[in-house]
Amino acid sequence: MNGMQSPLPFYHKLAANLLIIAILSTILFLGRDILMPICFAAVLAILLLPINNWMVKKGMPQVVSMLISIFLALVFITAVFYFLSKQIGGFLEDLPTIKKNLNAHLQTAQQWIRENLNITKKQQNEAVTNATNDIKHSGAGMVGSTFLSAAQAIVVLVLLPIYTFLMLYYRVLIKQFLLDVFTEKHRAKVEDVLRESRSIIQSYMLGLVLEMGIVAIFNAIGFFIAGIEYAIFLAVLAAILNLIPYVGMLIATIICMVITLTTSNNISSVLSVAVVLTIVQFIDNNILMPYVVSSKVRINALVSIVGVLIGGALAGVSGMFLSIPGIAILKAVFDRVDGLQPWGMLLGDDQSLARIKKKRLARSRKPKAA
């Protein structure tokens, strides 16, 4: 015995990593109603930090600059919601026409089903009636859950500015805590992770806002050229849903096509919506996303898609929205922790690094010349 401890075998390390992932996932799933508002407040606080620091440099008191920063953010969010509510209001004013077009499409669909599937209109109506009765029976539960969701949303809207203010106010204390948790020899790495995490969140979120604006403009131009009704409403709706990586535009395309189907009797309008959104999505994925959003978030597409789905399963839409910056922060941590660098490489999109390591391994295995 030489007194040296042998390193743990790989399966021990893998089991420990998977156990930690399972514990963290369980905590996130069970505590998502508490953790998600805190996460959004942390993101908002990081975004407002440059504005707050700028006002402090101009001689404004710290607390006053925090309050003004949060107020400006609330004004921006309120303006976005007001614009959307106005667009939705204009859409709802045409409900009679929408209902008429929808009935016409239903008649066409019933006729097609009767001719091709040999299901009579009476049988179709009975199936619809049964489904409607089932919905009515579960209506009380749906109303209760809807009311609960609305109440939770109101609570989040109230707590979000409070959380954001407190995080800005105690940011030095929180940073010092994170530094003191680790030993002195890891202090530089922790500071690098904190600095890179702040840069990731600021670059990613500001890039998303810029991307959303550009996508909305492109959508609106395409819809106006195609003569689509409610072009601005659909353009903004698709741009907002596009904030959910990869999955959002697919959902937006389906919703916009359905809305267009209810407002027009011309099937070409529905196809035009799909074509416009497909072209804009191509431009977004190949130009906007790489250069506007992903300059600081080097995550490969496979991990991004899986991460979005896992985030949605654990924390709903909030988890899907925060999944990409969350994975990018994890990568920043993995890249600086001994033994976890391979996980960081797996999350990233730099294939050249993997090729270099592969070549080095191949050279090391070549027998040396005598």
Image (tube, rainbow, N blue to C red):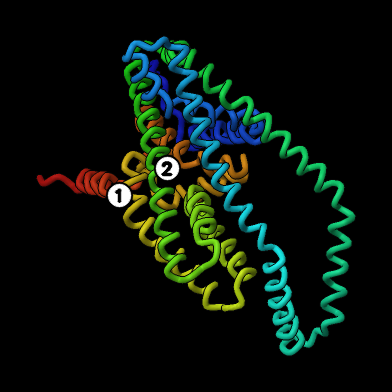
Badge 2 amino acid:
Val
Residue at the location (54% across, 46% down)?
83
Determine crowd level at label 2: few under 14, some 14-19, many 20+ residues with C-alpha closer than 10 A.
Answer: some
Instruction: Tell me if 253 is positioned left or right of 182 in this view.
Output: right
Q: Check contact, mark 2 vs mark 1: CB within 8 A.
A: no
Residue at the location (86% across, 52% down)?
138
Q: Quick check: can you spot residue 353?
A: yes
**Mark before the other along the chain sequence, 2 or 1:** 2
Instruction: Tell me if 306 is positioned left or right of 344 in this view.
Output: right
**Quadrant location of the N terminus?**
top left
Where residue 22 appears, as percent x and y from the top left, is 60, 35
Question: Which label is found at residue 283?
Answer: none
Where residue 76 appears, as percent x and y from the top left, is 49, 35
Considering depth in this image, is 16 or 44 the residue closer to the camera? Answer: 44
Badge 1 amino acid:
Gln
Where residue 230 appears, as percent x and y from the top left, is 55, 61
Looking at the image, the residue that sits furthest to the bottom is: 115
Kindly report the distance in space between the C-alpha atoms of the residues bearing marks 2 and 1. Answer: 29 Å
Q: Identify the element where label 1 is drawn.
A: helix
- From this view, report whether residue 248 is shown above or below residue 61: below
Residue at the location (59% across, 32% down)?
36
